[in-house]
Image (cartoon, rainbow, N blue to C red):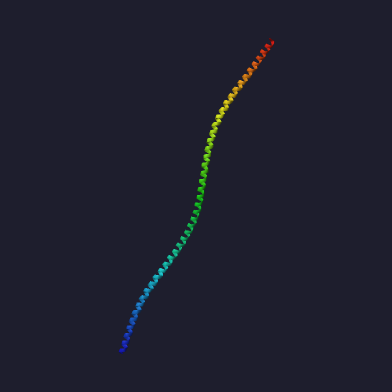
Amino acid sequence: MEKFREKIASIRAEADAANARADEYEKKYKELEQIQMQQEHEIIALTNQNKHLEEDLHTAQEKIESLKAIEEEDDDLKKENDAAQRKITLLEQELEKSEKAVREATKNFREADVKAEHFERKVQQLESLSFDQEKKVEELKAKIIELQSQLDEFNDQLNDI
């Protein structure tokens, strides 16, 4: 019986040791379950974060494409602006040339106008002189006719003598 008691005590000791190990394994199992649960939560959080980052990446890529398009449009607008600036510069140069030509033409016109007025006065003077000369010619013709008649009379008188 004693052997039997020793065996029971040994089995009890083994059972207590097994129970202690079981409790320890159960405690470790719960800790591992807790760690697994935390890791699953972390995986879910990281998955959500990854999803948001992919959406942000997609949005950023769309913005980059949009900005590239705007940059291309901006380059086109810069080219158009440069062409317009060159055209404006050429037009301004043409305008300056035209203004210079207008000033010169105006100056020449004024000079011609002054000369025309001078010549008009001269023409009026010459017309007046011509009119006076014609009057004198008429007067002289009248005198010539009178003198001719007097000469004829005088010749007749001489012939009569």
Name the outermost residue toward the bottom. Answer: 1
Label count reads 0
Q: Is residue 161 above or below residue 27?
A: above
Position of 151 with respect to 35 (left or right) is right
Residue 53 pos. (x, y %): 44, 63
Q: Is residue 145 above or below residue 78?
A: above
Position of 53 with respect to 147 (left or right) is left
Please report the residue visible at 58 percent of the width from the left and 26 percent of the height from the top. Answer: 126
Please report the residue visible at 67 percent of the width from the left and 11 percent of the height from the top. Answer: 158
Name the quadrant of the C terminus. Answer: top right
Please report the residue visible at 52 percent of the width from the left and 41 percent of the height from the top. Answer: 97
Name the outermost residue toward the left. Answer: 2
Q: Is residue 85 above or below residue 114?
A: below
Residue 143 vs residue 29, the one in the foreground: 143
Please report the residue visible at 38 percent of the width from the left and 72 percent of the height from the top. Answer: 35
Q: Which image quadrant is residue 155 in?
A: top right
Q: Is residue 35 above or below residue 15?
A: above
Residue 70 pos. (x, y %): 49, 55
Position of 90 with respect to 49 (left or right) is right
Residue 80 pos. (x, y %): 51, 51
Residue 64 vs residue 140, the one in the foreground: 140
Residue 29 pos. (x, y %): 37, 75
Name the quadrant of the N terminus. Answer: bottom left
Name the outermost residue toward the right. Answer: 160
